[in-house]
């Protein structure tokens, strides 16, 4: 029996010596009792002067806590540490050897420990490569929608732009999308609802771009990448579009899919998209330049009413630069008081052709540019809205107009205007604490609230519940409210009673044809009757001829405004006009 035991032990020793891992048997203090060749080859580069008497001493520079871990391990047996990996790369002596060492330490009994050593270099490299791939993928993926992000889009566009013969690959295109009114939805329902909306929009994009189920020619099908590049901005990159008009067909499909109503947090939401398209033939520069051009075309689609796509043309780049210049100059204009206010009279249309010239005035902003002269509001108001300056412009007009109005009342007495009309923007109404700004302007100027009429466009009042709530707050101050541009298609006479307004201003597009179109006469008459039944008065805008004035008077419109009575006037010129005009026959 003894020979068999000896043979078994000898076989075990031979196995340990030939094992492809390092095995070291040590005492509790680290003294080495036995080690196999593999462990010796791993430890010698770490041992000073080749001394392999104590394992803890050999590993002190790379695993200094190993001795303490063994000392404080109270259990009689068990795993002290498993697969502890140490970096050997900083040790010059082993530049050609393992770069990472794996150490496992087991307690065998009260007196002995067993260390298992291994070369973990390949394993660590593989894990690092896997991590790098994951990080690289994450760097190209939008966290919310799991779509490719801006970086991935830039790489794809750069790849397409760098091809020597783009025509051989078919037409490519970049579609840049921004959602109309998304900020208002986010502000009203909260960020969580906004994120849910973006996620559902992303899924609709994927579905709209997904090939039909019977599509089999995948090798020759066009490449389509949908990506979110930030906020509510998405990009679709198309490549290999060989059918004429294929890009616009995809654009229409996307607009239709995205434009359908959404159900978010118990609310039905309509959120359409404005899209700018750069075709490969018009693409130039690098990826960022292509995205910039697509964004320029998208902004034009938004200015044209939204919910549509616009193809980029090189001429748009120059116009965008001009708009950028205007934005910079407008910021300077606000700082240097280059803006000023003109006032267009609003007259009362009395019986027998008489006119009341002191009904009121509407404040209109103008810009005296130091180089270009007077800049038309048509050139800068929309830019001010897009770049976030419209609130500052509007507050300037309100403050200046209130001060002038109080001065006229003091100077002119009975012939002074009785009402001041000032236009409001969405930015002002959405600004936190803006009601307090209005109160401060009234107090500092000495303006009475009942003499102020604030005007919102029909489109603004009809589309936004938050705006309507703010309008009720203004009415509570005693301020009058007017609905501007009525008849342009956003509201209806049936819903007029839902809007908290005192005055309806009939759009000039109706007034200008009132004397020649029976249809327009009927619309004007209906608006006047409904407004009067609701206790509202009416103003006919854009009256330019005696015939137009006669029609709106005949249809019992209360007030009129237009070049027939007066063009917009500076404050001093308005005083002269009021002084010179009394009741006249029109």
Image: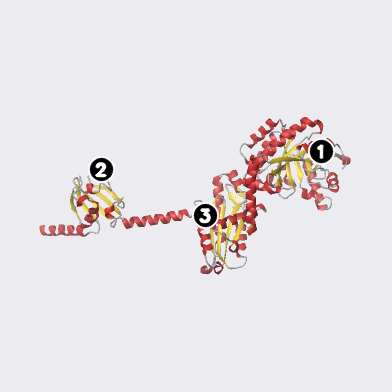
| Label 2 crowd bin: few (<14), some (14–19), many (20+), radius 10 Å | few
Label 2 sits on a secondary structure element that is helix
Judged left or right of residue 65, residue 506 is right
Q: Percent x, y for residue 572? A: 77, 36
Is residue 466 visible in the rendered structure shown here? Answer: no
Q: Image point 22% across, 47% down: which residue?
A: 57
Label 1 sits on a secondary structure element that is helix
- Mark nearer the viewer, 2 or 1: 1
Assign the C terminus to one quadrant of the image.
top right
Assign the N terminus to one quadrant of the image.
bottom left
What is the spatial separation of the Cα atoms under label 2 and label 1, in whole angstroms?
Answer: 98 Å
- The earlier-in-sequence mark between 2 and 3 is 2
Where does label 1 land, which residue? 577
Where does label 2 land, which residue? 68
Image position of 293 with respect to 579: above or below: below
Q: Quadrant of residue 562?
A: top right
Where does label 3 land, which residue? 150
Q: Percent x, y for residue 550? A: 86, 46
Q: Is label 1 in contact with label 3 (beta carbons under 8 Å)? A: no
What is the spatial separation of the Cα atoms under label 1 and label 3, in whole angstroms?
Answer: 59 Å
Residue farthest to the left, as pictured: 2
Q: As rendered, which of 101 and 494 lies closer to the eye? A: 101
Is residue 333 visible in the rendered structure shown here? Answer: yes
Label 3 sits on a secondary structure element that is helix
| Label 3 crowd bin: few (<14), some (14–19), many (20+), radius 10 Å | many
Q: As rendered, which of 475 and 526 lies closer to the eye? A: 475
- The earlier-in-sequence mark between 1 and 3 is 3
- Mark nearer the viewer, 2 or 3: 3
Q: Quadrant of residue 172?
A: bottom right
- The earlier-in-sequence mark between 2 and 1 is 2
């Amino acid at each position: 029996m003894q020979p068999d035991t000896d043979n078994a032990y000898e076989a075990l020793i031979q196995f340990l010596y030939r094992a492809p891992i390092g095995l070291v048997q040590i005492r509790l203090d680290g003294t080495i009792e036995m080690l196999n060749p593999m462990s010796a080859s791993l430890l010698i580069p770490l041992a000073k002067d080749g001394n392999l008497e104590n394992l803890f001493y050999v590993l002190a520079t790379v695993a200094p806590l190993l001795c303490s871990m063994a000392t404080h391990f109270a259990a009689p047996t068990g795993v002290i540490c498993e697969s502890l990996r140490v970096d050997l790369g900083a040790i010059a002596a082993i530049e050609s050897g393992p770069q990472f060492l794996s150490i496992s330490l087991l307690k065998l009994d009260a007196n002995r420990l067993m260390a298992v050593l291994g070369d973990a270099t390949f394993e660590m490299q593989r894990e690092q490569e896997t991590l790098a791939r994951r990080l690289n993928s994450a760097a190209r993926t939008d966290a919310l929608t799991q779509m490719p992000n801006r970086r991935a889009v830039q790489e794809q566009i750069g790849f397409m732009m760098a091809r020597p013969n783009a025509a051989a690959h078919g037409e490519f295109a970049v579609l840049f999308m921004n959602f109309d009114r998304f900020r208002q939805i986010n502000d009203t329902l909260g960020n969580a609802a906004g994120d849910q909306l973006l996620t559902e929009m992303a899924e609709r994009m994927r579905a709209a771009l997904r090939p039909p189920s019977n599509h089999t020619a995948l090798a020759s099908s066009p490449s389509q990448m949908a990506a979110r590049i930030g906020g509510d901005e998405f990009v679709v990159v198309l490549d290999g579009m060989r059918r004429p008009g294929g890009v616009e067909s995809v654009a229409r499909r996307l607009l239709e899919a995205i434009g359908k109503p959404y159900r978010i947090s118990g609310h039905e939401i309509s959120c359409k998209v404005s899209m700018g398209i750069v075709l490969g033939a018009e693409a130039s520069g690098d990826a960022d330049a292509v995205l910039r051009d697509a964004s320029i075309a998208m902004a034009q689609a938004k200015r044209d009413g939204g919910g549509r796509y616009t193809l980029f043309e090189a001429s748009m780049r120059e116009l965008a630069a001009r708009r950028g210049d205007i934005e910079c100059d407008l910021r300077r204009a606000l700082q240097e008081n280059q803006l000023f206010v003109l006032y267009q009279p609003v007259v009362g249309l009395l019986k027998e052709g008489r006119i009341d010239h002191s009904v009121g005035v509407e404040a209109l902003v103008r810009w005296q540019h130091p180089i270009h002269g007077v800049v038309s509001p048509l050139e800068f108001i929309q830019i001010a809205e897009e770049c976030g300056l419209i609130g500052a412009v509007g507050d300037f007009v309100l403050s200046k107009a209130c001060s002038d109005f109080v001065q006229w009342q003091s100077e002119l007495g009975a012939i002074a205007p009785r009402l001041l009309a000032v236009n409001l923007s969405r930015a002002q109404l959405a600004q936190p604490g803006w009601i307090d700004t209005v109160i401060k302007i009234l107090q500092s100027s000495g303006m009475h609230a009942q003499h102020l009429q604030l005007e919102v466009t029909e489109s603004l009042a009809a589309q936004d519940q938050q705006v309507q709530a703010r309008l009720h707050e203004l009415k509570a101050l005693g301020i009058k409210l007017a609905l501007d541009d009525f008849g342009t298609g956003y509201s209806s006479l049936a819903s007029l009673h839902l809007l908290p307004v005192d005055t309806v201003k009939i759009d000039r597009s109706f007034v200008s044809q009132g004397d020649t179109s029976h249809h327009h006469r009927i619309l004007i008459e209906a608006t006047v009757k409904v407004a009067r039944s609701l206790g509202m008065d009416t103003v006919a805008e854009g009256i330019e001829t005696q015939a137009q004035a006669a029609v709106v008077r005949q249809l019992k419109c209360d007030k009129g405004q237009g070049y027939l009575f007066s063009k917009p006037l500076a404050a001093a010129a308005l005083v002269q006009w009021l002084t010179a005009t009394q009741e006249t026959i029109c």
